[in-house]
């Protein structure tokens, strides 16, 4: 049976309407999901009155940062370890999800989130802090990082976070989207936000940025920036040198064999101009005065 042009036009019009309606539903659903996520995170964030008062660092050449109580250094077996928990304004948040390992914040930016650690480096790429499916995901530590006890030493820790501006094709600046601003050639964002803050149940620390670089995901075969353990001080310093060699800028921040590192990373295909591009921001822990 032949379909008339009028009937075909009606069918096409109906199909177009269905597509538009589906797009609107997905958009509204995304906005609702975004709102729910923000409300859930706001509940986790401490109120101003609950935040602890901390003294500024007195280390020469360092920015004014907050000092932390000393974590317990008593070593006992991990399975029965007892340690003194540091004063932490996010302490209650750790009870909301057993996978929570830290709270990360870069003052003056949108980066102010809990950091979790799952069984792999996949689950929290598309799951919220409450373990619901979410394209925003949740910042998470690399599975190579160990949190079995206060005495465990991770010489370098890597945190992954989604660049939702690329994933959702929306300029919403959520999760680790603003990390890409560190690559700006005028360095204004870097100068305004040179320090990262991170609170765990073991310590509250600040980290000063010393390198910003873009790399290919496939390059991890030759340079694994997610390493947490090193065979020797020489191996560790070679890792630091590799970061400096890749860095977009020369930053006068000293790093020696006694330091600890924190690396934040996110997707950066638009910035890098190629598939699999990833931005990495490297920082070393601010030394105690």
Image (cartoon, rainbow, N blue to C red):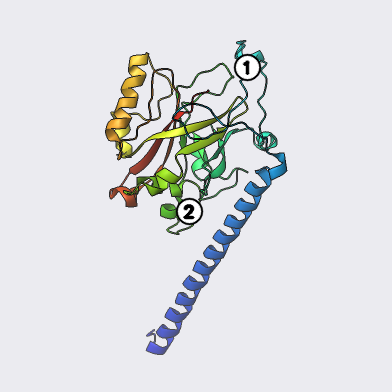
Residue 101: x and y in percent read 58, 31
Q: Is residue 60 left or right of residue 204?
A: left
Measuring 39% from the left and 18% from the top, which residue is drawn there?
A: 257
Residue where numbered disc 2 is placed: 173
Residue 262: x and y in percent read 45, 31
Any part of residue 125 in sight: yes
Residue 197: x and y in percent read 53, 36
Q: Is residue 73 left or right of residue 164?
A: right
User: Which picture quadrant has residue 253?
Assistant: top left
Residue 177: x and y in percent read 45, 49
Q: CA distance from mark 1 to mark 2?
A: 37 Å
**Helix, strand or loop for disc 1:** loop
Q: Quadrant of the N terminus?
A: bottom left
Residue nearest the viewer, comparing 13 with 133: 133
**Helix, strand or loop for disc 2:** loop
The numbered mark at residue 72 is 1
């Amino acid at each position: 049976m032949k379909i008339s042009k009028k009937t075909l036009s009606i069918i096409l019009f109906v199909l177009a309407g269905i597509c538009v309606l589906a797009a609107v539903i997905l958009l509204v659903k995304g906005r609702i999901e975004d709102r729910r996520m923000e409300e859930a995170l706001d509940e986790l964030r401490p109120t101003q009155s609950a935040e602890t008062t901390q003294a500024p660092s007195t280390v020469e050449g360092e920015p004014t940062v907050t000092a932390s109580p000393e974590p317990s250094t008593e070593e006992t077996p991990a399975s029965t370890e007892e340690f003194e928990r540091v004063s932490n304004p996010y302490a209650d948040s750790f009870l909301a999800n057993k996978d929570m390992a830290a709270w990360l914040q870069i003052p003056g930016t949108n980066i102010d989130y809990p950091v979790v650690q799952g069984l792999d480096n996949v689950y929290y790429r598309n799951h919220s802090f409450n373990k619901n499916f979410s394209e925003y995901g949740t910042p998470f530590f690399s599975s190579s990082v160990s949190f079995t006890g206060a005495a465990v030493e991770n010489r370098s820790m890597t945190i992954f976070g989604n660049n939702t501006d690329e994933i959702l094709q929306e300029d919403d600046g959520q999760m680790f989207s603003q990390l890409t601003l560190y690559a700006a050639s005028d360095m204004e964002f870097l100068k305004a936000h040179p320090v990262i803050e991170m609170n765990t149940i073991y310590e509250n620390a600040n980290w000063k940025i010393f390198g910003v670089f873009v790399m290919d995901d496939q390059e991890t075969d030759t340079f694994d920036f997610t390493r947490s353990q090193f065979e020797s001080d020489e191996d560790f310093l070679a890792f630091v040198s590799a970061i400096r060699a890749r860095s977009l800028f020369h930053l006068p921040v000293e790093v020696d064999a006694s330091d600890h590192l924190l690396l934040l990373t996110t997707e950066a295909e638009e910035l890098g101009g190629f598939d699999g591009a990833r931005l990495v921001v490297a920082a070393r822990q601010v030394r105690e005065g």
